[in-house]
Image: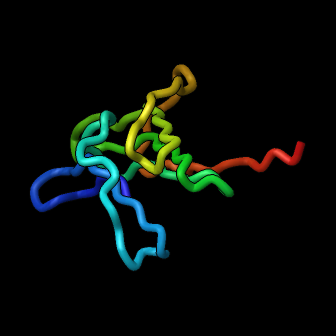
Amino acid sequence: VVGGLGPKQPMADVWVSQDLGKTFVRTCAEAPFGRRVSPGLAACPGKPQQTVLVGGGWNEDPPCWDCWVSSDAGEQWVQVATPVNEVQRRQPAVGFLWDSA
């Protein structure tokens, strides 16, 4: 779980479950990408600790078009380049393509 809407404003925390959602542990209290709702989020198949977050936004704020990668289940995040001149968006679909090579 990343961000989302809290009682009065968006959140910037990251939570992880290792038991299919029965329990959660907070891995990051304040992620560097800031507060947002409706980002795209995906975990890498076979390596769920590798996670990608992209986009999102909040109310009248402009949507985001940044991309962040975590290799440790959301404890630390690194911003990576996104395509130039793309339209900012909320609720993007994020997925991984399987490389069979």
What residue lies at 37% left-to-right and 35% top-to-bottom? 64
Residue pushed farthest bottom? 22
In the image, what residue occupies the spot 36% across and 74% down?
A: 23
The C terminus: image quadrant: top right
As drawn, the residue found furthest toward the right would be 101
Q: How is the image coloured?
A: rainbow
Q: Position of residue 40 (x, y in %)?
A: 47, 49
Q: Is residue 24 left or right of residue 86?
A: left
When the figure is inspected, residue 47 is found, relative to residue 101, above or below; the finding is: below
Left or right, 61 with respect to 87, comes to: left
Q: Residue 91, position in %: x, y? A: 44, 51
The answer to whether 41 appears left or right of 9 in the picture is right
Which one is in front, 34 or 90? 34
Question: Residue drawn 48% across and 32% down?
Answer: 87
Specify the quadrant that holds the N terminus.
Answer: bottom left
Q: Is the residue 44 above or below the residue 20 in the image?
A: above
49 or 81, which lies in front?
Answer: 49
In the image, is 61 to the left or to the right of 68?
Answer: left
Task: Residue 63 in the image: state x and y as whole percent.
Answer: 35, 38
Residue sitting at x 67%, y 48%: 96
Expressed as whole percent of the image width and height from the top left, the position of residue 27 reads: 34, 52
Residue extending furthest toward the top: 84
In the image shown, does 93 or 49 lie closer to the viewer? 49
Tally the numbered discs.
0
